[in-house]
Structures are given as structure tokens and as C-alpha cells.
Amino acid sequence: MSNKIVLFSYGSLQKQEVQLSLYKRVLKGNEDQLKGFKLAKKLLYDQYPIIIETKDNTDLISGFVFEITLKELKFTDEYEGEHYRRIQVKLESGREAWCYVM
């Protein structure tokens, strides 16, 4: 895949039906973890998880790393909407990835 973008997902983007709707394909991913973040106590619209940065290395979020194209990243930005912002993070594997946070 040209122009690979690395994306860390801890929520709905891991679901096959969301991937098929958004990207018209199922993504292949690897498990990874993100330190210094935790799940918020409330869900967005009572169904979507939200992570917040704590900078505490004992806080850990498990998820998956996917490779997508730049065009697919733009679709993802639209899907995540105004409630999330995309930031670059360093994962436990050492990989740099984009991630959506509150």
C-alpha cells in the first residue's frame, strides 16, 4: 500500500462493519498498547469510548494498529467528527501512530 498511514484504534474502528462501511475493505491489524492514556468514565453518546491523556505510565489502553492510506485517513477524520482530535502518539511497540482523543 502506498502512502501508508499508521492508525491506532481502541474503539469502533476495530469493528469489521465500520471498516467495510468506511474503507470498503477489512483492515488487517496488530495488537498494541498506548501508555499515558486512560478510558474516560463516560462514553460519547453512551456508546463510543473516549480516551484522555494522563501522562501516567501506569495508565494503558489496548487496541489495534492498522495501516491505511492518506485518503482513508481523511474518511476517518470525517467519521470521528468534531468530538475527537487526531494526535500522533508513540505506542508500546515503538511505532508512531495517529490516534483520536477527546
Image (cartoon, rainbow, N blue to C red):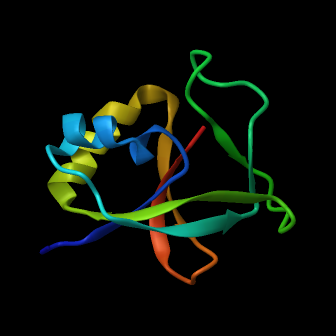
Quarter of the N terminus within the rendering: bottom left
Picture quadrant of residue 5: bottom left
Residue 23 is left or right of residue 88, and the answer is left
Q: Is residue 94 left or right of residue 60?
A: left
Residue 3 or residue 49, whichever sits in front? 49
Q: Name the quarter where the C terminus is drawn.
A: top right
Residue occupying image coordinates x 82% and y 59%: 59
Q: Is residue 92 above or below residue 28?
A: below
Residue 8: x %, y % from top left: 48, 59
Q: Determine the image quadrant of residue 22.
A: top left
Q: Is residue 7 above or below residue 32?
A: above
**Does residue 12 sit above or below 86 in this rendering?**
above
Foreground pick, 101 / 1: 1
Foreground residue, 48 or 85? 48
User: Where is residue 23, by image quadrant?
Assistant: top left
Where is residue 13 shown, x and y percent of the image?
A: 40, 44
Q: Residue furthest bottom?
A: 94
The residue closer to the viewer here, 86 or 68, is 68
In the displayed structure, 60 sits above or below 90; it is: above
Residue at image location 14% in from the left, 43% down from the top: 24
Q: Residue at x 64, y 77 (%)?
A: 92
Where residue 41 appears, x then y in whole percent?
Answer: 79, 30
Seen at 51% across and 28% down, the residue is 83
Q: Residue furthest top?
A: 45
- Image coords of residue 12 (percent x, y): 46, 38
